[in-house]
Image (spheres, rainbow, N blue to C red):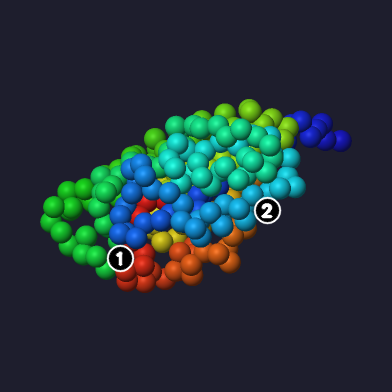
Amino acid sequence: MSDVTDKDITVVHLMRHGEVANPDGILYGRLPGYHLSDLGRRMADRVAEHLSGRDVTHVVASPLERAQETAEPIAKAHGLGLATDERLIEADNIFQGKTFGVGDGALRKPGNWKHLVNPFRPSWGEPYVDQVVRMMSALSAAKDKARGHEAVVVSHQLPIWIVRSYVERRRLWHDPRRRQCTLASLTTFTYQGDRIVSVGYTEPARDLVPAHLLAGAKPVKGQDKAFGA
């Protein structure tokens, strides 16, 4: 007979924010001032509706505006305050503030080559291992706040994918086009006590996501810039 009780099971939904208003195609990274688009707000509302019947007792987000705005309707739907955790912030990137994506010639600019020498660390930004450490710590803190219930944690694509890859024992370096972490998606970690026992993935707002931004979609010139996530 199992000794596991409901109090031993905690569910942490790690959510990527919704679409951002970014008409100039800037890799915004950690820059302030980038807010959800109207579509992004619809995505956030959709996920809030999706989670409305769940036992959510804690909602926390990255300090960046797009994450805060995504988390707000979820917290409101459950009558909760919104917490902020700096550990959930976007990964640092040397190309922040620039355009950098498919078809824009960024990889052909000699001035950028020195930043591209090591894709395993990576050399252009925050080390993957550092992202794992801070994200695992943030997830654990959310789990402790919601122990026996559920938490929603809003962050950004790269840190979400990296911590999931770590938990699922995949290599951390990867092809960004193959990340399974669509806008407003939920990567769900189930804890038994303090141990992660399963990882799930859902896309409650999939029908709102532009086709070229879905996980695994073929890049389209001018529509697949790595804006920051």
Q: Position of residue 157 (x, y in %)?
A: 45, 50
Residue 128 position by quadrant: top left
Residue positioned 62% across, 40% down in the render = 75
75 or 185: which is nearer to us?
75
Residue beneath disc 1: 102
The residue positioned farthest toward the left in the image shown: 110
Residue 24 position by quadrant: bottom left
Label 1: few (<14), some (14–19) or many (≥20) C-alpha neighbours in 10 Å: some
Question: What type is the residue that disc 2 sits on?
Answer: His
Question: What type is the residue that disc 1 sits on?
Answer: Val
Up-down: is 93 above or below 135?
below
Q: Secondary structure at mark 2?
A: helix
Q: CB of mark 2 within 8 Å of CB of mark 1?
A: no
- Residue 205 in view (yes/no): yes
- Residue 173 in view (yes/no): no
Q: Position of residue 68 (x, y in %)?
A: 50, 41
Residue positioned 33% across, 49% down in the render = 28
Left or right, 113 with reference to 170? left
Residue positioned 18% across, 53% down in the render = 112
Q: Secondary structure at mark 1?
A: loop
* Gap between marks 2 and 1 measured at Cα: 33 Å
Mark 2 or mark 1: which is in front? 2
Residue beneath disc 2: 50
129 or 141: which is nearer to us?
141
Which numbered disc, 2 or 1, marks the residue that appears first in the sequence? 2
Q: Position of residue 14 (x, y in %)?
A: 56, 44
The quarter of the picture where the N terminus appears is top right
Left or right, 105 with reference to 17? left
